[in-house]
Image (cartoon, coloured by chain):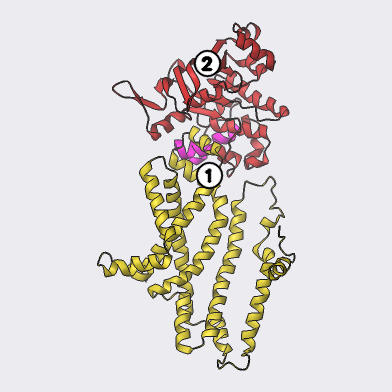
Amino acid sequence: MTASFLNRFGTRRALLVGCLVFVALVVTGCSSGKAAYNIRPQFFWDSLLKPDSAIINGLGLTIGISVIAQLIGVTMGVFAAMGRMAKFLPFRLVANFYIWVFRGTPLLVQLSFFYYGLATAGLFRWPTVVAGPIDILPQVLAGIVILGVNEGAYMAEIVRAGILAVDPGQTEAAKSLGMTYGQTMSRIVLPQAARVIIPPLGNEFNNMLKTTSLLSALSIFELYNTFSVSAGHSYATFELFAACAVWYLILTTIWGVVQSRIERRFSRGTTTSNSSGVGPRNKGFAARFMSLRAPIEQ
Amino acid sequence: MTTVSDNLLGAIGGVPRPETDVVVDARDVNKYFGRLHVLKDVCLQVKRQETVVVIGPSGSGKTTFIRCVNHLEKIQGGRIFVNGHLIGYRETGGGKLVEDREKNISLQRQEIGMVFQRFNLFPHMTALENIVEAPIHVRGIPEEEARVVGRALLERVGLAAKENVYPNQLSGGQQQRIAIARALAMKPALMLFDEPTSALDPEMIGEVLEVMKELAREGMTMIVVSHEMGFAREVANRVVMMDDGVVVEEGTPDQVFSAPSQERTKTFLSKIL
């Protein structure tokens, strides 16, 4: 019943309305009378409209870590995908082992093992890296690298699917022009695979933005940890985690807009006309999000 | 600066000079797909500036054979020399053949242009970008120079106005002409055509054949797998008939088409003419 209601109504719009109701509740400070908890809306509004330096820092860390980790992930994914498809058996074994391990264990375990585990055993301590004006702390460096390597294992399959989607005739044409394997990959195959890779890559990055919250386990004051700590101090748990959720929504929404722009750019050379077309895939994120017709189900 | 000339090879600075009189020398080539024996002791010589048309029923191995000439397919026996260089393999002390390093194979392929049945233009590049890609990134020619040659080639194949157009916005015939220009831009000593008109609508076949005829007349060395008998009669120096992985018969177009000596050739020709 609920499901069919959602189908007719549109899951996306249901979510949107849900969010609005939720925010309205918070704003009006509705506390249902009996609860001892006293909602203080200014905690919610202040952390959104007048974010202090801790929140700004947390935002910066979340975005920065996500971007760098995703870049590492894409790079690792390309190499792992090529490794999986290599003729040379040891390459295939290494790539398969890497993907097997990092997809088969929880990220939280990987973070703990490679940061705390290695250090406690005296095997490896992550260094502080000086990058221009900023020092990258050991736990941040570890967080970026482990997130990136973990992401690479997932990207590998996405990249592999993208490479396999490219017409083999493209590789043959490139070879017949005297291109080496590396040139064929970097100039002919990967740019075409990108069209297939980019939509799931966008989803991966959306995930990455949110997954960085696990880095609180390494005492990194990214967005979630910042709110978590300040909620602990102020006991405004309800208001602050609601604000925290809104911040993540803002990040992922902005990313959604960027993503649809990128997807449109990478589809060049695939349409038969010069116009950008009017199909649903070419509609902007905002247009798709707000579309008045509910998505058609089956 | 290259001056714009009125012919195709002029656009790339004249007829590329093969180093030897015999450009292609295939000796006893054997090829298997698994247990299927697709090329059986195939021998073929192509002399400088010669156009050889290979005909035969589908599955006869003609496409496989020309794909072996630039090592898109491995061979299991025999040798193929282009310009006197053994293609795809190097000979060890004991006379055994070992597949050559990828880099050397790439170098050899630079001298051999190939045109495919399905064009295989790079869809993410414009017509001109398709043509200048390999000269710039494989040969290392300065971008400006490559563009001048590329534009001259586009003009020669009648598509000067399409330089900034992506392949998907072009007709099959236009795409194939650009594919020919792309191969020519590498200044190859030999051109291979793998059924270049088979994927084209009938009204577009002529424009592609015109370009190929011009190329043959200007003295390019060519192996063409094709069923275009008119083309073969007009420009082929030799016609080679293949069937079931074997060269059944070869001779001038007149000999093969008008007075075939082999029964299999007669049967085949009676079906397609």
Q: Residue at x 60, y 18 (%)?
A: B56
**Judging from the image, what secondary structure is the residue with disc 1 in?**
helix
- Percent position of residue A66, x then y: 47, 66
Q: Look at the image and tell me whether residue A121 can be seen.
A: yes
Q: Colour of chain B?
A: red
Q: Amino acid at mark 1?
A: Leu
Q: Colour of chain A?
A: yellow
Identify the chain of the residue marked 2, using the numbered disc in the image: B
Q: Quadrant of residue B199?
A: top right
Identify the chain of the residue marked 1, using the numbered disc in the image: A
- Percent position of residue B95, x then y: 32, 20
What numbered label is drawn on residue A258?
none
**Judging from the image, what secondary structure is the residue with disc 2 in?**
strand
- Percent position of residue A159, x then y: 50, 51
Name the quarter where the N terminus of chain A is drawn. Answer: bottom right
Relative to B74, B130 lies left or right: right
| Residue for badge 1 | A164
Q: Amino acid at mark 2?
A: Val
| Residue for badge 2 | B246
| Labels 1 & 2 near each other (Cβ < 8 A) | no
Q: Is residue B268 above or below residue A40?
A: above
Q: Residue at x 62, y 89 (%)?
A: A29
Relative to A77, B121 lies left or right: right
The residues colored magenta run B132-153
Residue at the left extreme of this rendering? A122
Q: Is residue B14 above or below residue B253?
A: below
Q: Is residue B46 above or below residue B120?
A: above
- Percent position of residue A4, x then y: 71, 67
Q: Residue at x 52, y 39 (%)?
A: B133
User: Neighbour class for label 1 at 10 Å: few (<14), some, many (≥20)?
Assistant: few
